[in-house]
Amino acid sequence: DGGITQSPKYLFRKEGQNVTLSCEQNLNHDAMYWYRQDPGQGLRLIYYSQIVNDFQKGDIAEGYSVSREKKESFPLTVTSAQKNPTAFYLCASSTPPGLGNTGELFFGEGSRLTVL
Amino acid sequence: AQKITQTQPGMFVQEKEAVTLDCTYDTSDPSYGLFWYKQPSSGEMIFLIYQGSYDQQNATEGRYSLNFQKARKSANLVISASQLGDSAMYFCARLTSGTYKYIFGTGTRLKVLA
C-alpha cells in the first residue's frame, strides 16, 4: 500500500542526546514536511523540502536538522540544541495543487518523543 | 500574520445529529485552498475535504460538507448524521497557491455522545 511510514512510534531520549526520526514515503511525492504538535496547539512547520537535495526552514527550525538525499526519505534530527523537544512529530508529503490535485497533505502516523 | 482561527476548543454532539465546526482565516491572497483534517486519538491526520478559493460551489464528501463564505473568510465544516467514530480532533488548514506552506488552526475536539 502507498503511504508514509514514520519510525519509531515512541522514542525516549536523555537530555543532551541527538535523535533521528525516520520518514519514508512511496507516494512519489516531490514535497515532504516535518511538523511538530504540542498539546492544545495546531501543527507548526519545522522544515519542508520541495525537491531532492533542497530544503527550507519552517517556523520553528531552531534545534532541528534534516536531509533530503532521496525522494522517498526525509529524516529529522532533533539536536541537543532544541530546548523543549518533548512533542508529537508528524511527517507529511504532497504533490503541488493543480491538474486535478488538491495539494492535500498525506501524513504518517507520527512519532512521540519524550525527553527524560 | 495570516492565521487560521478555530474558536471552539471543544464540542459535543448527539449521535445522528449534525454539527458545525467553525473556521475563519486571514489572508490577502486571491488564490488559496482550504482543507479539513481529522485526527483520532491514534494521532494520524486524515484528510477530509478541500475547497478552492475560486470554487463556486461548496465542497461535499459523503457526510462532510464545507460551508464556504469567501467574503466572510470562513470555511466551516458540517458533519451530518454524527457517528461515535467521528469523535476526534478536527483541524482547518489553508494553503496559498504557488507555495508549500500550510497554516493550521489550533483544532476543535469533537465528542459524539451515544
Image (cartoon, rainbow, N blue to C red):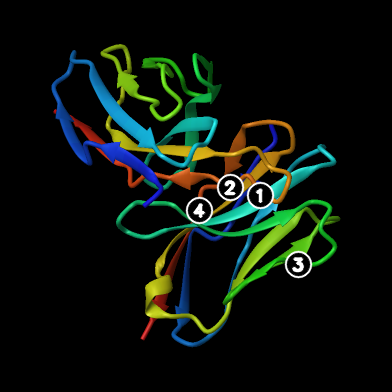
Q: Nearer the viewer, mark 3 or mark 4?
A: 3
Which residue occupies 33% across, 47% down? A109
Q: Is residue A35 above or below residue B71?
A: above
- Tell me the distance, in whole angstroms, between the alpha carbons under discs 1 and 2: 5 Å
**A74 to B65, vertically: above or below:** above
Q: Earlier in the sequence, mark 3 or mark 4?
A: 3
Dot 3: what SS?
A: loop
Q: Secondary structure at mark 4?
A: loop
Task: Calculate the distance from the C-alpha at mark 3 to the C-alpha at mark 1.
Answer: 15 Å
Residue at 35% across, 24% down: A75
Q: Which residue is mark 1?
A: A102
Which residue matches tag 4? B107
Kind of residue at disc 2:
Glu
Q: For the residues carrying marks 3 and 2, which lies nearer the camera in this image?
A: 2
Crowd class of label 4 (few under 14; some 14 to 19; many from 20; radius 10 Å): many
Secondary element type, mark 1? loop
Q: Nearer the viewer, residue B100 or B105?
A: B100
Labels 3 and 4 positioned on one and the same chain: yes
Cβ–Cβ under 8 Å for marks 4 and 2 = no
Q: Are marks 3 and 4 in contact (CB under 8 Å)?
A: no
Q: Nearer the viewer, mark 4 or mark 2?
A: 2
- Which of the labelled discs sits on residue A14, or is there none? none
**CA neighbours of label 2 inside 10 A, class few (<14), some (14 to 19), many (20+):** many
Residue occupied by mark 3: B58
Q: Amino acid at mark 3?
A: Asn
The residue positioned 40% from the left and 16% from the top of the image is A67
* Label 4: chain letter: B
Q: Is mark 1 in CB contact (under 8 Å) with mark 2? A: yes
Q: Residue at x 48, y 80 (%)?
A: B82
Q: Which percent across, then down, holds residue A56?
A: 54, 18
Q: Which residue is mark 2?
A: A104
